[in-house]
Amino acid sequence: MANLGYLQVVRHCNHVCGFCSNPTTPYSHDLESMQTLVDDFVARDYFGVILTGGEPTLHPDLPAIARYARDQGLHVRMITNGHRLAERSFAEAMADAGLQLVHVSIYSVDPAIEAELRGTEGTLERAFAAIENALRVGLEVNINCVINRKNADHLDRNVKALTGRFPQLRHFVWNNLDPSMGRAEVNQDQYTPRLADFELSLHRALRFLHKSGRTFRVEKVPLCYMTDFAWASTETRKIVKGEERIVYFLDAKQGVRQTEWDHLYAPGCDRCTLREICGGLFDRGDGYDPAELAPVFVDRDRIVQTILEDPSDPARQRIGLAEWRVLHAERVARAKEEAAEARRHQLPVVGQITDKGLRRFEAKRRAESRRTAERNLQMERLAEQLPAGPDER
Ligand code: SF4
C-alpha cells in the first residue's frame, strides 16, 4: 500500500479563497504535537505525509517537521499556495529539511480570475516564482487545482499555459470543489460548478497531458464525467488498491480515517458497469445534482488492469486481474466491518487551543470578514472550527 496521510500544520492562510473548505480555526500545533501525528503514520506503515493547511508555510516549525518526517522514513510532500516558496531562501530551507515534492495550487492562469478566486492580488506571479524556485532547488513539483465555477471552462488552457512555461511539470491533480465545508458551503451559488460545466475542458486537459506523457489524478469527479481516464480517479484507484487515508484536521473533526470511497449515487448507477469502482457524486448536502449522473457501459476490468499495471505507481501491486477479483470481493465483503472498525479506532489528539491561538483566530476572523464582505461573500459557519458551544463565543 502507498497510503498517504494528511497533516494540517496550520489552519490560517494569507489568501481568502471564497471556496476554502479548511478555513482558520483556533487550534494550533507545536513541533511536538505534529511529531505525535507523524509517529502515528509511521506506526501504520504509511508511505508518506502531506503537510497541508491552511497555508502550511506559515508555521515556523515547518522545516523542522519536514525533517522529522523524512528522518522517520516518510515521503514528505507539501501543498502550498506558493507565497513563501517564492522566496529562494525558503525553498532552499525546505529542500534541505527533506521536503521531496511540492504541490503548488493554481486555479487559473488568467491573473484576474486567479486573484478573484484567492481574494488576493498578485498571487499568480508569486506561484510562478514558487515553481521556479522549487524546481531550482531540486524539488518535484505538481500542480493542484480545485475545479470551481470560475475556472470550469478553461482547465485545458491552464495545463497548456503551465506546461508551456514549465516543461518540467509532470503531474497534475484536480479536486472538484467540496461544497460541504467551510466557505465553500456558504458560497455555493458563486463557486459550485455543474458537472457539465467542466466536462469538456477537463477531458481536453487530461487528453493533452496524456498525449504528452504526463500523469494526473482527479478527485471528487464521478467516472461518467471522465470515462476515458477513469484509471486516474483518486477514489477509483483507492477502491481498486484497497487503500485508506487519514486526515489530521486541525479543527473539531480531529483525525478522520477514511476506508470507504463511495459517496452518493443516482438510481441509474445500479445499471452502470463502473458502479463497483466509482466514488459517485461527492456531496454531503445538495451542492450537486444527481440528475447529472448517467450510467456508462464500458469495460471495468480494463480500467482495473490499467491501475494494477501502472508503472509510475509506487504501490503497484503486481497482481493479475484474477487475483484482484478475489481480493476485491473479500474487501467488499469486509467493507462495512472495516469502516466501523476505522470509526472506533482511536487516533491521537490533534493540536491544542491556546490563548495565543484564540487571539490569532479572532484577529484573522475579523480581517477575513472585512475581505469577504468587500466581495459579497459569506464567512464560514463556526461549528466545525470550534470544539464546543461555538454560538456562545
Ligand atoms: S453513473 Fe453512477 S456509478 Fe456510473 S460512473 Fe456515473 S456516478 Fe459512477
Image: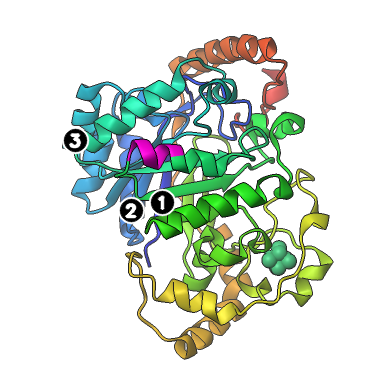
Q: Amino acid at mark 3?
A: Val
Mark drawn on residue 48:
2
The answer to whether residue 199 is above or below residue 303 is above
| 3 vs 1, front mark | 3
Write down which quadrant ligand 1 falls in.
bottom right
Q: Earlier in the sequence, mark 3 or mark 1?
A: 1
Asked whether disc 1 touches disc 2, contact meaning CB atoms under 8 Å apart, the reply is yes
Question: Can you tell which quarter of the image residue 390 is in?
Answer: top right
The quadrant of the image that shows the C terminus is top right
* Residue at image mark 3: 137
Query: What element does badge 2 sit on?
Result: strand
Which secondary structure dominates the residues rendered in magenta?
helix
Residue 365, image x, y percentages: 59, 15
Three-letter amino acid code at the position of disc 2: Gly
Structural distance between the alpha carbons of marks 2 and 3: 21 Å
Extent of the magenta region? 161-166
Vertical comparison of 259 with 27: above or below: below
Query: In this figure, which residue is indicated by the disc labeled 1?
Result: 5
Q: Residues within 10 Å of mark 1 (few under 14, many from 20)?
A: many
- Where does the image place residue 169, in percent across and percent down from the top left? 34, 45
| Mark earlier in primary sequence (1, 2) | 1
Q: Quadrant of residue 378?
A: top right
Q: Residue at x 29, y 44 (%)?
A: 168
Assess whether residue 378 is covered by the magenta stretch: no
Residue 338, can we see it? Answer: yes
Residue closest to the eye, 94 or 173: 173
Secondary-structure class at tag 1: strand
